[in-house]
Amino acid sequence: MITLNAFLCLLIAIRLFTFNRENCQYKAKYSWLAWLMITSSASVFLFSSFGLLNRAYCAQVVMNIALLICFLKSKGNIGTLCTLCRSPNQHQHHKRLNK
């Protein structure tokens, strides 16, 4: 189970690190939150890989705090965390497809 958690944390860090903003507006608070998630999830992976489970637990707590901030900001709506930033053209195209 520890290996699975470490691997999932690695995937989270890679996905956040490779995020492409495209047409989304830069927001410093979200960038800092992403940085916090990247460093804490990568730390869980590294500490777990080297058998430092006590430190991995501390990094997991930091990651959980960052997730809590996301959920508080979205008022518990996980859908807002999953929505995509779209340009106006993409939004119109999406509306036409859903009709």
Image (tube, grey):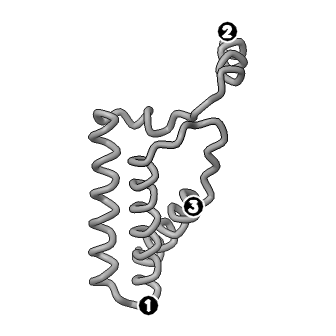
Closer to the chain start, of discs 3 and 2, is: 3
Q: Which residue is drawn at the image coordinates 39% and 62% (left, top)?
A: 36
x then y, percent, for residue 66: 33, 55
Residue tagged by mark 2? 99
Of the 4 image quadrants, the one containing the C terminus is: top right
Looking at the image, residue 15 lies above or below residue 41: above
Left or right position of 13 against 70: right
Q: Mark 1 and 2 residues: CB-CB less than 8 Å, in contact?
A: no
Left or right position of 92 against 26: right
Q: Mark 3 and 1 residues: CB-CB less than 8 Å, in contact?
A: no
Q: Which residue is drawn at the image coordinates 58% and 58% (left, top)?
A: 15
Going by the numbered disc 2, the residue's amino acid type is Lys
Q: CA distance from mark 3 to mark 2?
A: 35 Å
Q: CA distance from mark 1 to mark 2?
A: 52 Å
Quadrant of the image occupied by residue 44: bottom left
x then y, percent, for residue 45: 46, 76
Closer to the observer: label 3 or label 2?
3
